[in-house]
Every structure is written in structure tokens, then in C-alpha cells.
Image (tube, grey):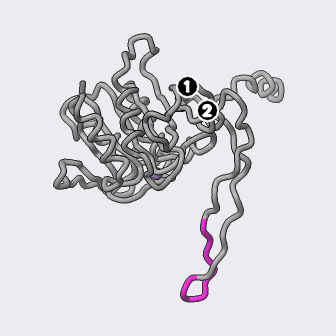
């Protein structure tokens, strides 16, 4: 099996190394990741400049671009053979509910999915890399499962509690929860006295009930949400048609 690995925390991130180490034992891996932390990059492509690829001492390729750039160039000519699976992560912190719209980790997997390749995004619930090795073992467990009863291609969003491997609960199918709106912007001043703004923290959980990713991980379980790309609000089509008449 050939696996392409990317992330959004950059090619030096411990989560990427742990994931690559775990999967190198069971597959032929290629790692193509951003040269710096591009968390929050979502599905952005760099169209205003060329991308350059460098190879690190450990064999990882790093790119002066976004996670989506990395997967895109890998799948459109940079890497010789089409991968059987693309995985992203392990991200430094959760990607649940509305996070998935902003996440570069999810975006890297989404890019592969758009090319018809099965893809999985992995994140740890808490940032800081505690128990990242056990998260990597969970990721390997998932990759080693037989996928033949799962409709392909698939796009799975996985969030793993920061617990020792033996204490991590079962793999659980979930839906995305929802957050409240984000915390207010943080105002400050730059050294020249100009006003600056830092994007605030994500909102607290709003829909975190049973069945959601938030709920499963709060119970120590591994949350797996199948994602899709079509944003069409189908229930609103009839209302829209009526409004247009
Ligand atoms: Mn990140």
C-alpha cells in the first residue's frame, strides 16, 4: 500500500513524525508537508507564486505552501505513483464541529478526496503532543482495517483523546457537533502604536450531544466522522424556488 502523508502544522511537527513512523512499518510512505505552520489555512491554493519543494534529512518533502498545495502538487505530478490512501496529521489539537471548515489538516485530506482517493484526517483532542505516540498507534490501527465494506472514496475526520493507548475507548462513528460563534477578536498595539487584531479562540461547544464528535471524545472514545464536500442546502432548494417565482 502506498500512503501520502501531509499535515498543516509543518514538516517539523511531532505529530507528523509520529504518524509517519507508525505508517512506515506497514506501507510505502511519502511525506509532503508545509515548510511552516499553516493551521487554519483551510482549502487554500497558492496561485500567485510558484511552489518549491525541498527534501529534509529524514526524507520528508517540504513545500512553501499550504496543506492543500502539498497534496495537490503531489497528486498532479510531483509524486510518481498515485497513492492508495492519503492521511493528514496528526494535528496539534482538535478539529471537531465547525473547526473542520478552517482546518488545514482536514483540507489536506479533502484535497485527496476531491481527486477520488480515500483520505483520513487525524487530530489529537488537546494540543501539546501529550500521548502522541498512542494517537499514532490508533491511526495505524485505523489504516490497517479493511476498507472494502466502506464506500469509496471516503473522507474520514478522526479525533483521538490524549490518553495512554490502553485507556483509549473504542472507535465510534459520529456526526460533527456545532460551536457557538468564536470568541471576540483580541485588540492590541504594534510597536509603532498602530492597532492590531488577533483572531480569537474558537467558540465553546453548542451542539455536543450524544452522537457528536465532541461527545464521543469527552467519553474517551475515538471519534470518526465521515465528511462530504457538497455544501448544497438541499432542504432549502424548494423554498428558494418558491422565492424565485
Ligand atoms: Mn494544525
Can you give x and y, in whole percent of width and height, for residue 177 in the image? 67, 36
Can you give x and y, in whole percent of width and height, for residue 100 in the image? 56, 41
In 3D space, how far apart are the residues under numbered discs 2 and 1 (Cα atoms)? 7 Å
Which residue is depicted at the point 37% across and 16% down?
146
Residue holding disc 2: 216
Which residue is depicted at the point 53% across and 30% down?
169
Tell me, for residue 35, which label it has, or none. Answer: none
User: Residue 175, relative to residue 191: is it above or below?
Assistant: above
Contact (CB < 8 A) between labels 2 and 1?
A: yes
Choose the circle earlier in sequence order: 2 or 1.
Answer: 1
- The answer to whether residue 142 is left or right of residue 239 is left
Q: Is residue 38 visible?
A: yes
User: Residue 23, relative to residue 116: is it above or below?
Assistant: below
Tell me, for residue 172, which label it has, or none. Answer: 1
Q: What stretch is highlighted in magenta?
A: 190-198
Quick one: label 1, few (<14), some, or many (20+) residues within 10 Å?
some
Q: Camera-side residue: 107 or 91?
A: 91
Quarter of the image where one finds residue 97? top right
Task: Tell me the quadrant of the picture where the C terminus can be found.
Answer: top right
Find out if the beta carbon at label 1 lies less than 8 Å from the nearest ligand 1 atom.
no
Which residue is depicted at the point 49% across and 34% down?
168
Task: Tell me the quadrant of the picture where the N terminus can be found.
Answer: top left
- The answer to whether residue 179 is left or right of residue 139 is right
Q: Is residue 228 visible?
A: no
Amino acid at each position: 500500500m502506498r500512503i501520502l502523508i501531509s499535515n498543516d502544522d509543518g514538516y517539523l511537527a511531532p505529530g507528523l513524525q509520529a504518524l509517519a513512523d507508525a505508517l512506515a512499518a506497514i506501507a510505502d510512505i511519502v511525506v509532503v508537508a508545509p515548510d511552516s505552520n499553516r493551521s487554519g489555512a483551510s482549502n487554500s491554493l497558492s496561485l500567485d507564486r510558484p511552489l518549491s519543494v525541498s527534501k529534509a534529512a529524514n526524507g520528508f518533502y517540504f513545500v512553501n505552501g499550504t496543506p492543500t498545495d502539498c497534496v495537490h502538487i503531489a497528486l498532479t505530478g510531483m509524486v510518481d505513483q498515485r497513492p492508495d490512501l492519503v492521511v493528514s496529521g496528526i494535528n496539534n489539537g482538535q478539529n471537531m464541529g465547525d473547526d473542520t471548515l478552517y482546518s488545514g489538516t482536514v483540507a489536506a485530506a479533502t484535497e485527496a478526496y476531491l481527486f477520488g482517493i480515500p483520505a483520513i484526517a487525524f487530530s489529537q483532542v488537546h494540543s501539546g503532543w501529550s500521548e502522541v505516540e498512542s494517537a499514532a498507534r490508533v491511526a495505524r490501527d485505523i489504516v490497517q482495517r479493511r476498507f472494502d465494506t466502506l464506500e469509496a472514496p471516503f473522507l474520514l475526520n478522526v479525533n483521538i483523546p490524549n490518553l495512554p493507548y490502553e485507556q483509549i475507548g473504542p472507535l465510534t462513528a459520529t456526526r460533527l457537533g456545532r460551536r457557538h460563534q468564536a470568541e471576540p477578536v483580541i485588540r492590541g498595539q504594534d510597536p509603532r502604536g498602530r492597532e492590531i487584531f488577533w483572531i480569537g479562540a474558537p467558540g465553546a461547544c453548542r451542539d455536543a450531544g450524544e452522537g457528536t464528535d465532541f461527545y464521543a471524545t469527552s467519553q474517551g472514545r475515538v471519534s470518526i466522522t465521515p465528511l462530504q464536500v457538497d455544501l448544497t442546502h438541499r432542504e432549502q432548494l424548494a423554498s428558494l424556488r418558491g422565492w424565485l417565482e
